[in-house]
Structures are given as structure tokens and as C-alpha cells.
């Protein structure tokens, strides 16, 4: 519909109405033509949650800036991280991030602590350099191995690998906590592998070496 054509339809005669705009669309002027385009605010993304949450920022966008978990992280980032060495509180920042990601992945599901309820969470294993050297590349890829220059107890360089998904039956695991639990084994596997760097900050604090100490 061109602008000059509006003279023919406006004002609309009694009993006449322009066709309704379809859901998910909006009318905008493109040059001198009125066109229907997608309305991002009204388009529902029906992809699986694992396709929509690939990063921490994705999780924040899905929850929105007014979600309590996002508000808590933003306040922590603004008030605490700005005043303290980030390395000293990396585990706290990581926990707040993981809480946001878990909430987004769960899509409204919350544990109710009922008798037959299962809650799933990622499980990790700390590998020494010797163990890493003996792994095949396929095994390293399977574990989504994350390497760093920290020292294990025997003095070898180490790495963190995702091992499997664990579940808690009617109880909260002290190693994870119900706030980081997800509703299915598949989500726990994805949670552990996709966000292993954040889990590393939360679960471990590698000892600095001469090569990586500042």
C-alpha cells in the first residue's frame, strides 16, 4: 500500500475495516510503501532451550533485567566486583551466573522437594597432566576438557572434565545445591559441557604458578 493510496481508504467508510495485522507482524513504512514485517516483541521462539541459551548473556536476556537472579548479579557486579579483586571472588560471581543459567534452562520449573522428585546436576572430575596425556583426542572432546595452568596435589598441571549427570533424590547435594539443579539429565549434561568455564570458576581455584602468576 502506497502513501498516495491512503486517500482512497482514509477516512474509511462506515462498516469498512482494514484487514487485521497478523500476530507476530507489524506495519511499517518502507520508503513510500506500507509493509508487514516481523515484530520481535511478539514472535515466539519455539526452539529448544538448549538452542536459545548458548551463553550467560543469552540466559540473562531470556529472564529479563527485572528477574531477581539477574538483579542480584548486576548489583553484585556493580557494588562488589568494582571494589574487590575479581579473582578473589570469582567463585561467587560464577555461582550467581550459574543460578541465572539454571533458571533459564529450567523454563519455570522449580524443585518442590517431594518424595519422588529427581533433580539433576553436572558432575566433574579433576585430571592430572599425566592422565590427560594418556587420553585420546576423542576422549578429551567427549569430556569437554578444560585445561589450565594450576597445580594438582601431586604437582602436575591439571584439567577439568565433565564426567556425567548426577541426580539427587528428595535431597539437595552439598556439592551442588538445589538452586543449580535442573529438571532433566539431558539439561544437566548440556549445563555442564556448555558452561564448563563458569563451573570451573565456581568449583575450583587453581593454584597460581610462576608461568601464570601476575
Image (cartoon, rainbow, N blue to C red):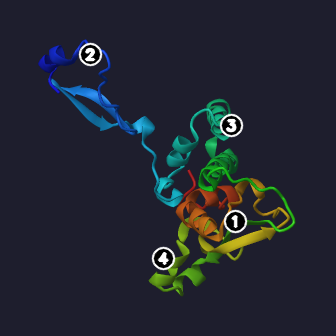
Q: Position of residue 149 (x, y in %)?
A: 56, 65
| Element under disc 4 | helix
> Which mark sits nearer the N-terminus, 4 or 2?
2
Circle 3 is placed at which residue position? 68
- For the residue pair 82 and 209, the one nearer the viewer reads as 82
Inter-mark Cα distance, 1 to 2: 60 Å
Rendered residue at 48%/55% (across/down): 54
Circle 1 is placed at which residue position? 121
- For the residue pair 16 and 126, the one nearer the viewer reads as 16
Q: Position of residue 130 (x, y in %)?
A: 58, 83
Label 2: few (<14), some (14–19) or many (≥20) C-alpha neighbours in 10 Å: few
Q: How many marks?
A: 4
Inter-mark Cα distance, 1 to 4: 20 Å
Inter-mark Cα distance, 1 to 3: 22 Å
- Contact (Cβ within 8 Å) of mark 4 with mark 2: no
Q: Position of residue 191 (x, y in %)?
A: 59, 62
Task: Please identify, in this view, whether the residue under mark 3 or under mark 4 is nearer the observer.
Answer: 3
- Contact (Cβ within 8 Å) of mark 1 with mark 2: no
Q: Left of 37 or right of it: where is 132?
A: right
Q: Is residue 148 in view from this perspective?
A: yes
Inter-mark Cα distance, 4 to 2: 65 Å
Label 3: few (<14), some (14–19) or many (≥20) C-alpha neighbours in 10 Å: few
Circle 2 is placed at which residue position? 12
- Contact (Cβ within 8 Å) of mark 3 with mark 4: no
Question: Could you say which quadrant of the image residue 93 lies in?
Answer: top right
Q: Which residue, as the protein is rendered here, is positioned at the far left?
A: 4
Tell me, for residue 62, which label it has, or none: none
> Which mark sits nearer the N-terminus, 1 or 2?
2
Label 1: few (<14), some (14–19) or many (≥20) C-alpha neighbours in 10 Å: many
Tell me, for residue 141, which label it has, or none: 4
Amino acid at each position: 500500500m502506497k502513501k498516495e493510496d491512503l486517500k482512497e481508504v482514509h477516512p474509511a467508510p462506515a462498516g469498512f475495516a482494514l484487514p487485521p495485522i497478523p500476530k507476530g507482524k507489524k506495519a511499517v513504512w518502507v520508503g513510500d510503501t506500507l509493509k508487514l514485517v516481523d515484530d520481535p516483541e511478539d514472535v515466539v521462539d519455539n526452539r529448544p532451550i538448549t538452542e536459545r541459551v548458548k551463553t550467560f548473556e543469552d540466559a540473562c536476556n531470556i529472564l529479563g533485567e527485572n528477574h531477581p537472579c539477574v538483579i542480584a548479579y548486576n548489583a553484585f557486579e556493580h557494588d562488589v566486583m568494582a571494589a574487590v579483586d575479581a579473582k578473589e571472588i570469582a567463585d561467587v560471581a560464577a555461582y550467581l551466573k550459574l543460578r541465572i543459567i539454571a533458571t533459564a534452562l529450567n523454563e519455570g520449573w522449580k524443585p518442590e522437594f517431594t518424595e519422588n522428585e529427581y533433580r539433576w546436576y553436572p558432575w566433574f572430575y579433576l585430571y592430572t597432566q599425566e592422565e590427560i596425556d594418556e587420553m585420546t583426542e576423542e576422549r578429551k572432546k567427549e569430556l569437554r576438557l578444560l585445561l589450565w595452568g594450576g597445580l594438582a596435589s601431586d604437582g602436575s598441571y591439571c584439567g577439568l572434565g565433565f564426567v556425567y549427570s548426577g541426580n539427587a533424590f528428595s535431597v539437595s547435594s552439598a556439592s551442588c545445591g538445589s538452586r543449580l539443579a535442573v529438571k532433566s539429565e539431558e539439561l544437566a549434561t548440556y549445563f555442564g559441557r556448555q558452561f564448563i568455564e563458569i563451573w570451573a570458576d565456581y568449583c575450583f581455584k587453581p593454584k597460581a604458578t610462576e608461568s601464570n602468576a601476575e
